[in-house]
Image (cartoon, rainbow, N blue to C red):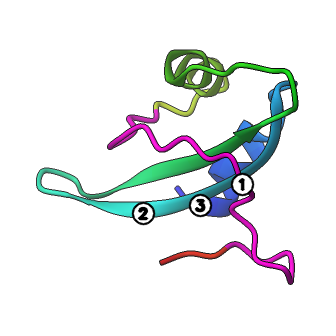
Amino acid sequence: VAPAEVESVILQHSGVAECGVVGAPDEKAGELPTAFVVAKQGVTLSERDLIQFTNARRYALRPIKKRPRKTSPLEDTGIHHRV
């Protein structure tokens, strides 16, 4: 699954302000998507909520680690900073 495809699903969540998805190494799968999500102001999002939301849209995502962010995953140019 392409990162942009996963991002578009997560961004449909009403509590998500911004999202960036990158591939993270995984011993079994080789690589798994990992989402960096910024919640809208005043909204608390849990990893479980986001997994249920994406699974309901037929994306069985298994995050590697919870990676909360208080700042945008976008650079000043509006492009995702993928490292």
Q: Which residues are magenta?
A: 61-80
Of residue 54 and residue 74, the one placed in the foreground of this image is 74
Q: Amino acid at mark 3?
A: Pro
| Location of residue 78 in the rendering, given as x and y in whole percent from the top left corner | 85, 75
Query: Would you say 27 lies left or right of 31 here?
Result: left
Disc nearer the start of the sequence (1/2): 2
Query: Would you say 70 lies left or right of 27 here?
Result: right
Q: State the residue at coordinates (60%, 16%).
A: 49
Q: State the residue at coordinates (76%, 77%).
A: 75
Disc nearer the start of the sequence (3/2): 3
> Of the numbered discs in the image, which one, if any, rests on residue 79?
none
Which residue ends up furthest to the bottom in the rendered image? 77
Q: Amino acid at mark 2?
A: Gly
Which residue ends up furthest to the left in the rendered image? 27
Residue under numbered circle 2: 23
Q: State the residue at coordinates (85%, 33%).
A: 40
Q: Amino acid at mark 1?
A: Thr
> What secondary structure is found at the residue carrying circle 2?
strand
> What secondary structure is found at the residue carrying circle 1?
loop
Q: Is residue 72 magenta?
A: yes
Instruction: Say whether marks 1 and 2 touch (CB < 8 Å).
Output: no
* Other residues around mark 3 within 10 Å, as few (<14) / some (14–19) / many (≥20): some
Q: CA distance from mark 3 to mark 1?
A: 19 Å
| Location of residue 70 in the rendering, given as x and y in whole percent from the top left corner | 68, 46
Q: CA distance from mark 3 to mark 2?
A: 8 Å
| Location of residue 1 in the rendering, given as x and y in whole percent from the top left corner | 52, 55
Residue under numbered circle 1: 71
> What secondary structure is found at the residue carrying circle 3?
helix
Main SS, magenta region, reads: loop
Of residue 78 and residue 56, the one placed in the foreground of this image is 78
* Other residues around mark 2 within 10 Å, as few (<14) / some (14–19) / many (≥20): some
> Of the numbered discs in the image, which one, if any, rests on residue 3?
3
